[in-house]
Image (tube, coloured by chain):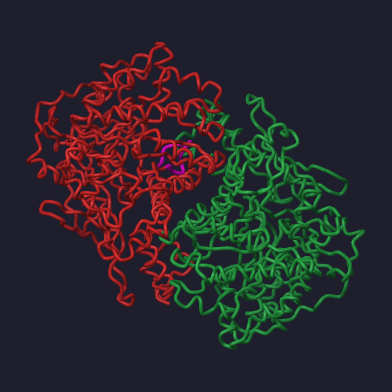
Chain colours: A red, B green
Amino acid sequence: MNIRQKPETLIPQSVTCGPLAGSRKIYAEPRANIRVPFREIVLEPSANEPPVRVYDASGPYTEDAPQIDLSQGLPRLRAAWYGTRDFESYHGRAVKPEDNGNVGEDRLVPPCPANVAPLRGKSGKPVTQYEFARAGIITEEMIYVAARENLGREKMLADAEAKLADGESFGADIPAFVTPEFVRAEIARGRAIIPANINHPELEPMIIGRNFLVKINANIGNSAVTSSVAEEVDKMVWSIRWGADTVMDLSTGRNIHNIRDWIIRNAPVPIGTVPIYQALEKVDGDPIKLTWEMFRDTLIEQAEQGVDYFTIHAGVRLAYVPLTARRTTGIVSRGGSIMARWCLSHHRESFLYEHFDEICDIMRAYDVSFSLGDGLRPGSIADANDRAQFAELETLGELTKIAWDKGCQVMIEGPGHVPMHKIKVNMEKQLEECGEAPFYTLGPLTTDIAPGYDHITSGIGAAMIGWFGCAMLCYVTPKEHLGLPDRDDVKTGVITYRIAAHAADLAKGHPAAQVRDDALSRARFDFRWQDQFNLSLDPETARAFHDETLPKEAHKVA
Amino acid sequence: MNIRQKPETLIPQSVTCGPLAGSRKIYAEPRANIRVPFREIVLEPSANEPPVRVYDASGPYTEDAPQIDLSQGLPRLRAAWYGTRDFESYHGRAVKPEDNGNVGEDRLVPPCPANVAPLRGKSGKPVTQYEFARAGIITEEMIYVAARENLGREKMLADAEAKLADGESFGADIPAFVTPEFVRAEIARGRAIIPANINHPELEPMIIGRNFLVKINANIGNSAVTSSVAEEVDKMVWSIRWGADTVMDLSTGRNIHNIRDWIIRNAPVPIGTVPIYQALEKVDGDPIKLTWEMFRDTLIEQAEQGVDYFTIHAGVRLAYVPLTARRTTGIVSRGGSIMARWCLSHHRESFLYEHFDEICDIMRAYDVSFSLGDGLRPGSIADANDRAQFAELETLGELTKIAWDKGCQVMIEGPGHVPMHKIKVNMEKQLEECGEAPFYTLGPLTTDIAPGYDHITSGIGAAMIGWFGCAMLCYVTPKEHLGLPDRDDVKTGVITYRIAAHAADLAKGHPAAQVRDDALSRARFDFRWQDQFNLSLDPETARAFHDETLPKEAHKVA
C-alpha cells in the first residue's frame, strides 16, 4: 500500500481500446466540422439486412486503430465551433497544494500536458446552451445532438408515428424526428440540457431530457488505498465503452485536481463532480470549517478544468434538517450530511442556498450545468417520499427558476430508495415543482434486502422511472453499500442501466428503439448466433455463456 | 462425456446442507401434526431487536444438523393428514423401458427406494384442495399455508391496515391477517391453489394466489451431455436453498422417470413438469407421432410419482397456429411448437383440447394442479400482446372453467417478452378471461437486446407484473437463450426473482413485507455489518463483496 512511486510512473500510459466485437465506428457529418459518432453492427450475409446503427458514447477509443495519447488528450473538436462565440481566454487560477490534498512532490501526479489556458464567457453575451437557445440561436452542439439522437430514424419516418402511438410516454413530447430546432426549443424551455463546459472542447455533445433517449451515468472515484491515475482514466474509458453517457468523478484524497485533469482531457463524455467533496478535503474533512469563500474558489478551480456539471446540494436548508430526525436511515447523501452538519453546527442557513445567485454566475460563465443535489433523499424504503425529501424537492424547484433566470442549464437529482408504487409520484412531483427540468435519479432501489445485488434492485426502479419520464439514470453497481466497485462491477452496473434505459425507451415508444430488439430477435429465430452476440449489449459475455455449454463453431451456425 | 458408469455411482449420495449464515430454522405448530418452517435471522445484541422471521422454502436441508438420506426421501409429513380422506392405494402402472428413454441396464439410474404404492381419489369424494374448499372443508394444507403466509403478522396487526392502505394492489384483496378460512375461501373461488399431489406427502404445502406472498419458480433439467441424477437432486436443493418456492423439472432424455423419482421423494416444494416433453421422448422426438393414448399414459405415470402441477398446452388450437405466421419469432414455447406441429401435420384440432375433460379427470384423481401453458407466448418484443397470444389466453379462460367444474386446481401461464408499457394489460386480461385464477409468468423480458443478462431484463418485468397481481414468477437465468444454467446461474436467477417478488410484495402493501427491509436499513444505519449481511437475500455474496475492499474484522463493527 505504501510503495513509493516516482511521479513518472504515475502518468497513465494506456487505456482499453479497440472496437466492440462485430462493430465498426462510423461518423455522420450533418454539417462541416460536425462529425457525429455511431456504432454499426454488421450482420452476417445470410441475414440480408443492413447494419444496425446504435448510439455510441464510447469516443475514439473504440475506433479500429485509435491514435490515443493520454498526454495529448482527445482532439479539441468543439474549439472549431467557438469562432463566433465571444469567450475570453485568461490566466486561470493557480493550482494550490491543497487542490491535490497537499501531496508530497514525490507522489504528485503531474498535470496533464494537454491543459490550456481557460476560457470564460462575458456578461451580456450568450455563453450557455440555454442562453443561445433562448436567443433563438442553434449551436453546433444542438446540431450534433439532433443527428446523434435520430439513429436510423431518417429511414423509418413512416413508422415513427405508429411507434409513438403504440408507446406510453406519460405526456412526454417525443418527436418522430429530432431536428436542431427541436433541440433548441427543448433547451430553451428548460426541458433538456447539453452539459458542455466551454473548457471541455474534447466533448462529444449529448443531450439529457425527457423527449430524448434515456441516458445513464456511471460514477467513478479513486480509493485512497489502491487507485492510481492510470486506473482512474481507464475506469472512465471502460465505463463509456459499455455505454455510460456521462461519468461522475467522485474522487477524494491526494492528487484529485490533477487526476481530474487527466480524466477531462481524455473524456468524450460530460464529466460531473460534487465540488463540496473537494472543498471538504481542503478543510481536513471537517464540515464545520467549510466557508463560502473556499467553496467558491473550488467551483472556479473545477470550472476552469472543464467539469461539465456540478452537483450542488443547495436544497438542504436549515429548516429541513429536523425533518430527518425520525427517519430510519437519517441523511444518507454524503453532500447532504455535510451540509446538514454545517447548518446545524452554525445554526445558519446553508451557504449554498444563500449564495445561490453567485454560484449561478460562476457556473454560467463556463456553462457548467447544475445538477441540483437531493441531499435529503431517502436511504431506505421506510423513508421514501417523506416530508424531508419533498420539502427539498420544492426548494430545488425554486432554485431551478433562479438558475434559469441567470442563464444556466439545470437538471435535478432524485432518489434513492423507493418502493415501486411510490416511484411515479416522484416523477410527477419533480416535473411539477421543477418546471419540467430533466430528472436524474439514483436507481431508485425498490427494496433494501439485497446488498450485493443492488444493481438489480435499482435497475427495476430505474427502468420504471425512466419510462415515467426520468431523463438520466445514475447507475448502481453490485458493490453498492458494500465496497468499491472494480472493473467487473462497473461493467455490470453500466450494462444493467443500459437495459433499464432501453426498456424505458421502448415503453415510451421511442421511434428507433425497437430496431435493435427486432434485429436481435430475427437473428435468434434464424439461429444466427454471431449476430445475436454482436447485437447484444455485451457480446463478450453472450458469446462466453454460449460457448460454456456449446463450444463448437458448428453450434453457432445451426 | 462417454465414461461408462455403474448404476451404483449413479445413486445420489449428498446435497448441499446446513443453515444459511446467521439463520436458524424454527417450526411453528398451529395444530398437532402441523409444523410450519420459518427461518429466523438473529441480530447482534447491540441491535436490541427480536430475530427477523422470514419465509423459508428450503426444507429440512437448512436445519442445523439435518439427517438427510436421499434413498429414504424426506419425511412423509402429509401422510398423517390423510386419515379421514378417502383415497385408495393401488398397484400403480408398471415402469416401462421407454419411461427412462430405453437406457441400457448398465446406465440405468435405479428407482428411489423411498417409493411406495400410489394413492388416488375416488369419484364422488373430495380429493383436490379445490373440492375440499368448495365443500367448506379446511384441510391441514390450508392451516399450514395460513400460518406460513403470516410470518410475523400476529405481532403487527395494529400496523397491517396502515401498510395495506399505503400500498397499491390494483384491486387485490390482501387480508391484514391470513386465516385458514381465508385460504379456503380463496381456493374455493379459484383465486389461489395449493399444488399438492396426494402422492407427494413429503411436500411442505405452499399457496399461489394474488392475495398471498408472490412466489417464484426455478426450472431445472438435465443435460443429455453432462448431468447425473446427483446433480439434478442437488439443483433442486440448491434452488430452494436460495428461495425457489416451486421447481419445474424439465429434464429430457435417459433416466428421466427415475431421476424424477429421486427429485420428488426429496422435494419439500411442489414439483412441476411439462408431460408433453416426456411423451415426445417416447416417440423418438417426432411430434407427429404423438397420440392421446400415450400422452394419457404419461400423465398417469407422472401423477403416480407425485408431480404437483402439469403444464398442459391445451390452448394451442389448430385455428390459432396461422396467427403466428407473420410473427418475428414464431412459436418459441417448446410445448407450443410441438402441439402446433402436430395440429398442422394432422390438420386436426389439438388432442389436448379435445380430451381436456379426460385430462381433468386424471389430474383430479391425484390433485395435480393445472398450469395451463402459454404455447403461443411472444418470443420477442415485436410479438408481444398479439392476436395469437390473446386468442390462446381466451381459450385458457374457457378451459379454466371446465377444470374447475371437474374439481381441479388451476393456474395460468403467461409471457414471455413484453415491453413495460404492455405488461399491465396482460395481467388485466388474464384476470378477466380466467376468472382470477392465479397467473404464473415467465419474466416477462422487457427488452431483447441483452442475452447474458436476461435475469435482469426479465426481473424488471417480473417485479412489475408481480405488483400488478401475478401470483408466481418463473425465473430466468443469465444463460437464458444461450446455454444451460450452472449452479451459479441458478442462484443468480433465484435471487433476482426473490428481489422481484419482494419488491412486488412491498408495492402491494403486504403487511409483513417491509419488516425485513426496515431491519436491514437499521443495521445499515448503525453499521452493524454482520446483521446487514445476514438479513440480505445472499449473505455470502454480501460478506464477500464487503471483504474484497475492507477485509478486516474491525471494518465490520465500525
Q: Position of residue A145 (x, y in %)?
A: 23, 49
Closer to us: B322 or A21? B322
Instruction: Specify the quadrant of the image occupied by residue B414.
Output: bottom right
Instruction: Specify the quadrant of the image occupied by residue B5.
Output: bottom right
Residue at the extreme left of the image, as rendered = A83
Is residue A485 magenta-colored? Answer: yes
Would residue B210 be visible to someone looking at this image?
yes
Q: Position of residue A306 (x, y in %)?
A: 20, 34
Residue at the extreme right of the image, as rendered = B84
Q: At 37% across and 48% down in the image, what residue appears? A: A172
Q: Position of residue B366 (x, y in %)?
A: 80, 68
Provide the major secondary structure of the magenta segment. Answer: loop
Is residue A515 magenta-colored? Answer: no
Closer to us: A283 or B353? B353
The number of callouts visible is: 0
State whether residue B321 is above or below residue A388: below
Would residue B64 be visible to someone looking at this image?
no
Closer to us: B89 or A464? A464
Q: In the drawing, does residue B537 fall left or right of residue B382?
A: right
Residue at the extreme bottom of the image, as rendered = B346
Q: In the drawing, does residue A9 fall left or right of residue B44?
A: left
Instruction: Specify the quadrant of the image occupied by residue B199.
Output: bottom right
Which region shows up in magenta? A476-486
> Quadrant of the image for the N terminus of chain B?
bottom right
State whether residue A522 is above or below residue A102: below
Q: In the drawing, does residue A425 fall left or right of residue B474?
A: left
State whether residue A253 is above or below residue A159: above
Q: Position of residue A519 (x, y in %)?
A: 37, 67
